[in-house]
């Protein structure tokens, strides 16, 4: 009786298999998006670090204003 309630009677349910494939594809898509966003974030962090380094060098080279 429990097997019948879970859908085991008559073999695998094609709707269940279709949903499982759809969910697996969605997981793959999200993993790919995560990798893309991490790479983009790393690139932005590198640019920000370079920019802050250039700013700090610029501050060191400035001369004080005459008063």
Image (spheres, helix red, strand yellow):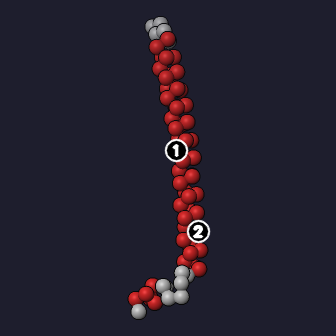
From the viewer's side, name the closer residue of 42 and 56.
Answer: 42
Where residue 59 sits: x, y (%)?
Answer: 48, 17
| Residue nearer the viewer, 49 or 57 | 49
Which residue is painted at 53% across and 61% down in the image?
27
Disc number for residue 22? 2
Task: Determine the secondary structure under disc 2.
Answer: helix
User: Of all residues shown, which one is farthest toward the front?
Assistant: 11
Q: Residue at x 56, y 41 (%)?
A: 40
The C terminus sits in image quarter:
top left
Can you tell which mark lies on residue 55?
Answer: none
Residue 50 in sight from this viewpoint: yes
Instruction: Tell me the SS state at disc 1.
Output: helix
Q: Residues within 10 Å of mark 2 (few under 14, many from 20)?
A: few
Q: Earlier in the sequence, mark 1 or mark 2?
A: 2
Find residue 17 and report its image quarter: bottom right
Extreme residue in the top direction: 66
From this viewpoint, is residue 65 visible?
Answer: no
The vertical placement of 1 against 59, above or below, is below
The residue that mark 1 highlights is 38
Q: Position of residue 24 (x, y in %)?
A: 55, 64
- The vertical placement of 1 against 40, above or below, is below
Find the distance from the CA under tag 1 to the CA under tag 2: 24 Å
Q: Classify the position of the N terminus by image quarter.
A: bottom left
- Residue at 52%, 32% (x, y): give it: 46
Q: What x and y, as percent, mark residue 37?
A: 55, 46
Task: Examine the rendered structure and indicate whether residue 21 appears above or below residue 41.
Answer: below
- Circle nearer the viewer, 1 or 2: 2
Q: Residue at x 51, y 35 (%)?
A: 45
Q: Position of residue 22 (x, y in %)?
A: 58, 68
Packing grade of label 1 (10 A; few <14, some 14-19, many >=20) is few
């Amino acid at each position: 009786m429990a097997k019948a309630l879970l859908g085991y009677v008559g073999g695998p349910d094609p709707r269940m298999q279709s949903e499982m494939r759809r969910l697996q594809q969605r997981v793959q898509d999200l993993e790919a998006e995560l990798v893309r966003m991490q790479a983009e974030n790393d690139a932005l962090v590198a640019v920000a670090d370079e920019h802050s380094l250039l700013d700090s060098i610029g501050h060191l080279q400035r001369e004080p204003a005459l008063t």
